[in-house]
Image (cartoon, rainbow, N blue to C red):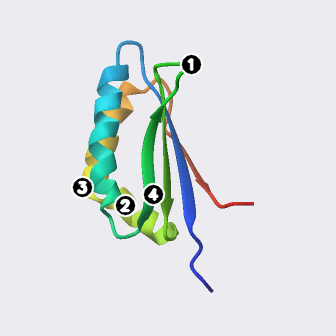
Amino acid sequence: MARMELSVFIRFHARAGQAAALAAALGEVVSPSRAEPGCVFIEAYRSVQDGALFQIHSRWVDEAAFDLHGGLAHTRRFLATVQPLLDHPLEVARTRPL
């Protein structure tokens, strides 16, 4: 079976007063993630309508590459940093094109 590229969308909504800290954490995790061999693309975004709403869109060579990403030190550090900054449980959507 051929490997199928995986697209991942992650939604982050900051608690009141935590948007700057969340933006900083997102800025720190993108570069090391982009350098991973299984990463095809990764970018962080901030909503123009809600300054506390952020998203990451990433593409990975396959699910195994994303699973590996989840266990790396920079990813674990990022998750530990951002979870207390959010006003909701982390929302991660693993997707493929229709």
Residue at the spot 56% in from the left edge and 57% down from the top edge: 7
First reached walking from the N terminus: tag 3 or tag 4: 4
Residue at the spot 42% in from the left edge and 27% down from the top edge: 86
Tell me the CA gap for discs 3 and 4. 19 Å
Which image quarter: residue 39? Answer: bottom left
First reached walking from the N terminus: tag 3 or tag 1: 1
Quadrant including the C terminus? bottom right
Tell me the CA gap for discs 4 and 2. 13 Å
| Badge 3 element | helix
Q: Is disc 1 surrounded by few (<14), some (14 to 19) or many (20+) residues within 10 Å?
A: few
| Badge 4 element | strand
Tell me the CA gap for discs 1 and 2. 30 Å
Q: Nearer the viewer, mark 4 or mark 2?
A: 4
**Residue that extends furthest to the bottom in the rendered view of this protein:** 1
Residue at the spot 43% in from the left edge and 23% down from the top edge: 14
Give the answer, above or below, for where 67 lies relative to 14: below
Q: Is disc 3 surrounded by few (<14), some (14 to 19) or many (20+) residues within 10 Å?
A: few
| Apparent side of residue 90 relative to residue 38 in the rendered image (left or right) | right
Amino acid found under the numbered disc labelled 2: His
Tell me the CA gap for discs 3 and 1. 32 Å
Tell me the CA gap for discs 2 and 3. 9 Å
Q: Nearer the viewer, mark 3 or mark 4?
A: 4
Q: Nearer the viewer, mark 3 or mark 1?
A: 1
Give the answer, above or below, for where 65 lies relative to 80: below
| Badge 2 element | helix
Disc 2 target residue: 69
Disc 1 target residue: 49
Disc 3 target residue: 73
Tell me the CA gap for discs 1 and 4. 24 Å
